[in-house]
Structures are given as C-alpha cells and as structure tokens.
Image (cartoon, grey):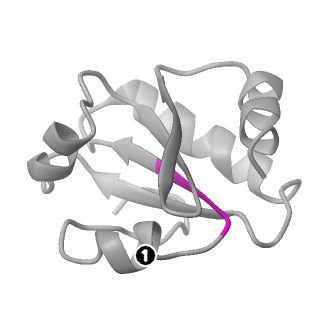
Amino acid sequence: MSDAAFPAIDTAGFAAQVLERPGLCVVDVWSATCVPCRQMTRLLSEIAADLPPQVMIGQVDADANPQLLERYGVRGLPTLLLFKDGVLVEARTGVDRKQVLKKAILAHA
C-alpha cells in the first residue's frame, strides 16, 4: 500500500466501495514504482482535511488491478478517477498543483 492512510480498492471490491457508494469518491490510481504517484498521494493527504467528510478517497494499485485500468481507459499514472454517485464524472492524469486538484474535487462534491 502507499504511504497515505487511504483505503485500498481492488477489482473485487470496486463495485461496493465506489460504484454503489453515494456521493463523491476520488480514486487515485497509482503504482509503487511511480515517483509522481508518491507526489499525488502527498497532495491528496494535504487536501483531504479540507474536503467535506462525505468525500471518500481510495487508492487502486495499478500493478495489481489491470482490469480496472482497462475498464476506465487509464493510460498513464497517476490518474484520478472521480465518481459521483457511482458515475465517472472526471478523469485526470498527471500531477497538478494542490489548489487545482482541490478545486477539481470540490467542483463535484
């Protein structure tokens, strides 16, 4: 698992943890060998305290869950998948500035 205390999401639990969950779910697709992924995790950790409590952030290990990457068209890491009430509303690849990420997440919260 990554450095942050975000729950791990895998293929088997994806429907229950993300698709069937009401509200906003931010899925951070990362890999242990990806340096920018560690930066994204750090940024999400900093942003998490400023988000409404109903926003859930979880992480998908790209190496262990290739089916999810294929299903959602993930081509680069890190990728954030934002699901609102189980529907994919935005996908972002790469690392943005903290304020840009926070604004993008709050736009769907």
- Verify whether residue 26 appears in magenta: yes
Question: In the displayed structure, does residue 63 sit left or right of residue 57?
Answer: left
Q: Which stretch did the figure color magenta?
A: 23-27
Amino acid, disc 1: Gln
Residue for badge 1: 17
Q: Position of residue 65 (x, y in %)?
A: 15, 55
Indicate whether residue 74 is drawn in magenta: no
In-image side of 68 versus 92 (left or right): left
How many labels sit on residues? 1
| Residue beneath the point at 86% across and 63% down | 52
Camera-side residue of 3 and 22? 22
Q: Secondary structure at mark 1?
A: helix
Residue at (43, 75) in percent of width and height: 17
Q: Vertical placement of 73 versus 59: above or below?
A: above
Residue 15 x/y as whole percent? 32, 72
Percent coordinates x, y for residue 54 in the rendering: 76, 72
